[in-house]
Image (tube, helix red, strand yellow):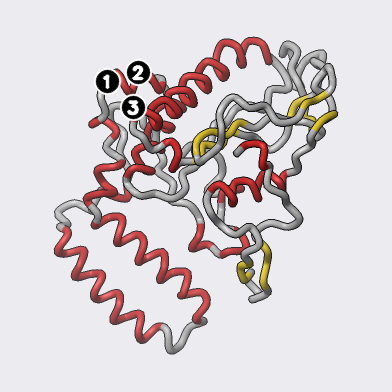
Amino acid sequence: MGGGASPGCFGGHFLGNQHDPFQTGGDPNKTDFSVNTFNFPQNMTLDQLEDRQGLAKRLDKIRHHVETPKVYDALDIFQRDAYRMVASSNAQKAFQISDEDAKTRDRYGRDRWGQSVLMARRLVEAGSRLVTVAFGGWDHHGNLKRDFLGFNFPRLDAAVSALIDDLEDRNILDKVLVVVMGEFGRTPKINKGGPVKGSKPGRDHWPDAMSILLAGGGVQGGRVIGATSRHAAYVVDRPVSPTDMHTTIYHALGLDPEIRFPDRTGRPRPAVEHGEVVHELF
């Protein structure tokens, strides 16, 4: 869910294109929101789609004898998953956000961010194992006060708090790990203004410290792990590395962080290298 490149940093990368995420597109806050994947061409029925699927399988048998197998392995997975999704009434229903109670939609926030997070909850309930909502627009080198206090923070607070409360009300919070994070922090000091002429002060990139929020998935609430210096410049207590964070997520999901995946050359690649579980969270 959400913006960004297609799929950009959210892609499958060395795992292969077949592991790229399905992107919904559009704005779930709009009344005419729909996922184009489920919109059949004019006058086409599901029976006709099944006929085409059968023909495609027969043509594939010929194609596999003359083309590079690895390329078509990825295409086969694309086609299989696409067909299952289009033909699944369960998947179609999950994207019908208009079925949600109006009060629930209001809790999440009547904007693209809030409704995308609500959609994420619907997808999890429908059986999705991983859903990502991309909240773009945090790179504020200028106009920090205006954009954060008046726009970003209120929307993020509403969406995340509504999600956690909603998951708890539905008795599934312990089964769902919620992770809220970016890729780095921001400078402790406010600058004199962004690169755009006339912009007011903001904050620049800062790799030495950042904050991450985790909820559900066995994580015990109300705990603060680690600390930074007075001005939030450097970690002074209980540093946690990115690989520690990845290992902790794997631990919460019951996955072996040392599992290895073959890259595109067939070489085994570890899912996480040199990470430790942040046991204080559990």
Residue under pointer 2: 106
Residue type at numbered disc 3: Lys
Residue 264, horizontal then vertical, whole percent: 62, 71
Residue under pointer 1: 102
The answer to whether mark 1 and mark 2 are in CB contact below 8 A is yes
Q: Quadrant of residue 28?
A: top left
Q: Nearer the viewer, residue 61 or 206?
A: 206
Residue under pointer 3: 30
Quadrant location of the C terminus in the rendered image: top right
Q: Nearer the viewer, residue 212 or 17?
A: 212
Quadrant location of the N terminus in the rendered image: top left
The numbered mark, 2 or 3, whose residue comes first in the sequence reads 3
Residue 162, horizontal then vertical, whole percent: 43, 23
- Left or right placement of residue 256 versus residue 208 in this view: left
Q: Nearer the viewer, residue 133 or 228?
A: 228
Which residue is at 58% across, 64% downward? 15
